[in-house]
Amino acid sequence: MKLCIAEKPSVGKELARILGANTRHDGYFEGNGYWVSWTFGHLCTLKAPDEYNSKLKWWKLYDLPIIPQKFSIKLIDNAGSKKQFKVLETLIQHPQCEELINCGDAGQEGELIQRWVYHKAGNKHPVKRLWISSLTEEAIREGFQKLQDETKYQHLYEAGSARAIGDWLLGINASRLYTLKYGNGKNVLSVGRVQTPTLAMIVERHHEIANFIPKDFWEVKTKFREVLFSYEKGRFFEPEKAEEMMKQIENELFTIVSFEKKKGKEYAPRMFDLTSLQVESNKKFNLTADETLKTVQQLYEKKIVTYPRVDTTYLPEDQHPKMAGILKGLSDYSQFTQEILAKPIPKSKRVFDNKKITDHHAIIPTGIKANNLSAVERDIYDAITRRFIANFLPVCEISNTKVIGESAKFPFKATGKEILSPGWRVLFGQDDDQSKEQLMPTFNKGEQGDHEPKMEKKQTTPPKYFTEATLLRAMETAGKQVDDEQMREVMKANGIGRPSTRANIIETLFRRRYISRKRKSLIPNATGIELIGSIHNELLKSAELTGRWELKLGQIERGKYDVKVFMSEMKTMVSELMAEVKKEVAKPISYQEPPEKKKKTERQQNTPSSKSSTTKKIICPICHKGEIIKGKTAYGCAEWKSGCSFKILFTDLKTKYQSDSINAQVIELWKKEHL
């Protein structure tokens, strides 16, 4: 028998159907020469410090650093996980078991989850790897025809293992160290390899804003033939100079020095990787990174988009023949796809490039009909599909105009852009930037006339607080402001964290009460600010240096860096950090108290008004019909089957609205943010 192990029951059930394993048992399916079972994500984890040495249960400064000679794993302390592991262990050790097929998530974390289970269960059978980017029946069947030997993914496992052990080493030691030095006896301070530099970026931006001193400046502009020209050399910080210029040009004619009109091309934005999808969803739909990840994961499990936890915006070259079939399947978008399908689909390097592919390719639709989607799912699916189609439509043809003029020998410039042929832009309509472009008439060199100069007083503005969208971009580029798509691709190797983990890192900062949300802005709380202020070791809080660790983990994954060297460097760094911080003079850090639940008096508990306030119905602020009801992970509208999209996640209830339950005040805050 061949034992297939998926990462979750829903995927296991689908694999069993396709493989013909139709007999259901407790925790697995059987049939056609296969057993098909599953994990529930992580069934195993690294042991806690006190499981290596019982005295480490108590936090003592002199016990640091904690560096086990050999790291070990254990089962997660959960009854369901233990029961499912027992099923897997029994099947792995069954005399009829001949081979294991790793059907886990095709990525670094998925590889680690499965290998730890095999190791814990004492597997001695050969292992094959199912590696697919889509859960469609076609992709699964094709994947089983091309099963890979497990050894091909050994470096992937080594990178995942090094990441987990490295995070344990730094997280356990640094958290204990800073808690004991700065925690004031009641404040547990969480410090991590990725979360701390991320927090540091948010705190640094906060300080930049708090310390910003605005400066007055003056701009001189002039209007000629209804076109606004700006002084080419920029702004004045001394009003006298601007006034002097105004005096000189007020009574002088305006002369056109040059008029230049150039045709150009604008290419469609690249297909989505996970980070760019989270950025777009935060900007466009006000979704958190975590909400976007969960939603696109649901779309993947519904088989209508490909694997989402990816860091590339390209497709492999062998996918080119499949594009026509996918486009034909997008029947709801036929008004756009007909033009593409009418002729051969080009094989552009902007789309198909094997050199830009890692474990997986960009997130694209599978071509399977998208039915029964929630409003949020529909938004995400539509964004992915339109971005996909856009890359096969003609380029947008534009005309860029630049006009240089002068008055009293002071140079002025005006620019404009005209869309000659929209191409891929038909998918998106007119954006804000287009509507701001001024229409440019034709000018002739040497043309002269009266003009209307004006002087405007303005002030410099501070940088903006991070939103989740801008923070994700900063994490991707290790804190460097990079707007160019091509440069971002280069910087990805040095980013902080992985695309699949960045959403959880941001949520962790909320859970630790290091940051909070104010509308879309991410604001550091007192504990977060003071924690970063107390960390003097740059390695712990530097985005760029942490990015270098990510680069080395990526090199381990590709077999270009020795995992033993990496672990040795990590242990040395942790030991040096412990010695350095132990010598510091400690100043306690403020404790961010969680919102307290007020205890009711016996009289309050028995009064009708108190009882009615807890059972009072709350009506949905969107449809104004449905009652707000409690689900498994969120509060939502009872009219959700009719398409109402109202939802507040339990995690958001605590982090955004500082409440443990839904109430009128929460609804009012939600309305201010969304309506």
Image: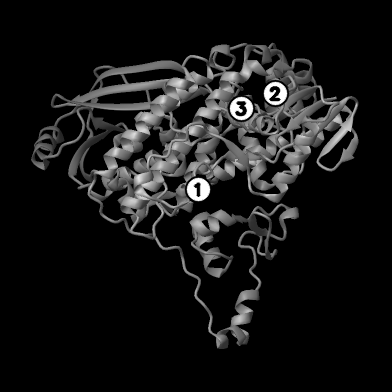
Residue hosting label 2: 132
Residue 552: percent from the left, percent from the top? 44, 22
Whether residue 216 is situated above or below residue 430 in the rendered picture: below
Residue 428 percent coordinates (x, y): 57, 33
Q: Quadrant of the N terminus?
A: top right
**First in residue order: circle 1 vs circle 3:** 1
Front disc: 3 or 2: 3
Binning the other alpha carbons within 10 Å of mark 2 as few (below 14), some (14 to 19) or many (20 upward) gives many
Which residue was labeled with disc 1? 54
The amino acid beneath tag 3 is Gly
Residue 403: quadrant of the picture? top left
Q: Residues within 10 Å of mark 1 (few under 14, many from 20)?
A: few
Mark 2–mark 1 distance (CA, rounded to whole Å): 43 Å
Residue beneath label 3, please?
107
The quarter in which the C terminus is drawn is bottom right
Left or right placement of residue 279 versus residue 459 in this view: right
